Image: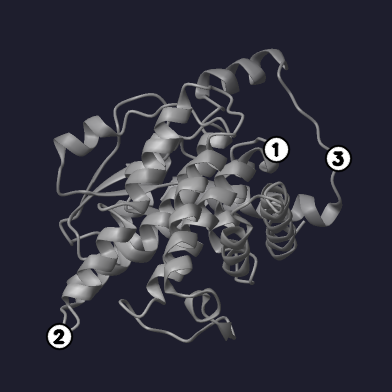
Amino acid sequence: MSLDARSREYREYVEAYLKDFYAQFHDAPQKDLYKAMEYSLLGGGKRLRPIFAFEFCRLCGRDWKDAAPFAAAVEMIHTYSLIHDDLPCMDNDDYRRGRLTNHKIFGEGMAVLAGDALLTDAFMVASKAKLVRPEDMATAIGLLAECAGSPGMVGGQVLDIMSQERELSEQEVLDIQSRKTGALINAACALGAIAGGASAEQVEAAVLAHPDAFVLAHPECKAEALAEADYIGSTAGIIKYAEESDASEFIIVTVRGVLYELERRCQGTGKKFYFPAVQPTCVNMDLITLEKLVHCLETGEGEVQIGVSDEAADQAKLTLDRMLEYAAR
């Protein structure tokens, strides 16, 4: 299934999940509050953050639906932030996604309470996740609170308000956006990995040893690695980021095989690359070792045969040929 098709499925699933969750409160005495909450929560949107949560869970090898409580929670927090952002005391917007904003329909007081309720309900929903390791729930809730609160999204909004009367430097703009927008996206990715059963990763030691280094992580890395990352992307994305970045030190959280290309692309720049001196950082990579390969060649054991079309076989051979070509340089 293509990423576009998966994204549509993810979007439809989280919307159904949110509808089902709030359906239980339709007859509650405070039903007017729920009407205001659902007006914004179910009023459209790209559902980008839930898509990230589901996809990262899938990349970890689990059923992506296991991430549904986390996916719903980050969307609820995102929606609360939009309701509050539109208020007269903030941006004073009349329209959001082609419709009147929440406070224009329900009044300022109810809009504030709808946002408050979505924020707190998000943690109730997140706590319903069935994790591979239940003890990871504390990490997940703490991560969500940090990314949504003063160090993350709320802090970014504060910096945005404080800077409205002056011209910002490029770094200040990046700092605001990394908190106001990026923090919750990072949370969605990390929570998806936690739901996917990603094991604990000791990146912290490398960060402490090189406090100014940027952490670049592969999306299949484990949850704590992703939570520490300044950038999450494919191997090609990591190489491109390091090549184009103004930073001089990087902690690379993926297999060490990427080092050759990093050093080749960044030759003469003085850039330094460090790898956490711990267990393999990606759960499904580096499973083939030289020892296993020698054993297979000597005994014929461990061979795996896969039937594919001639076209697929030719493409696979091309990839192997390129890898061998790089290795011979």
Where is 301 relative to 279, above or below? above
User: Residue sitting at 31 percent across and 51 percent down?
Assistant: 149
How packed is label 1: few (under 14 Cα within 10 Å), some, or many (20 or more)? some
Between 43 and 202, the residue placed more toward the observer is 43
Q: Are marks 2 and 3 in contact (CB under 8 Å)?
A: no
Which residue was labeled with disc 2?
A: 165
Badge 1 marks a residue whose secondary structure is: loop
Q: x and y percent of residue 216 in the render? A: 34, 49
In this view of the protein, can residue 29 be seen by the observer?
yes
Distance between the Cα atoms at labels 2 and 3?
64 Å
Disc nearest the viewer among 2 and 1: 2
Between 109 and 147, the residue placed more toward the observer is 109
Apparent side of residue 317 relative to residue 114 in the rendered image (left or right): right
Q: Earlier in the sequence, mark 2 or mark 3?
A: 2
Q: How many marks?
A: 3
User: Residue sitting at 66 percent across and 19 percent down?
Assistant: 296
Disc nearest the viewer among 3 and 1: 1
Where is 329 relative to 290, above or below? below
Between 208 and 22, the residue placed more toward the observer is 22
Q: Which mark is residue 63?
A: 1
Query: Could you tell me the amino acid type at mark 2?
Result: Glu
Distance between the Cα atoms at labels 2 and 1?
48 Å
Q: x and y percent of residue 142 in the render? A: 37, 37
Q: Quadrant of residue 243?
A: bottom left
Q: x and y percent of residue 321 in the render? A: 60, 50
Query: Could you tell me the amino acid type at mark 1?
Result: Asp
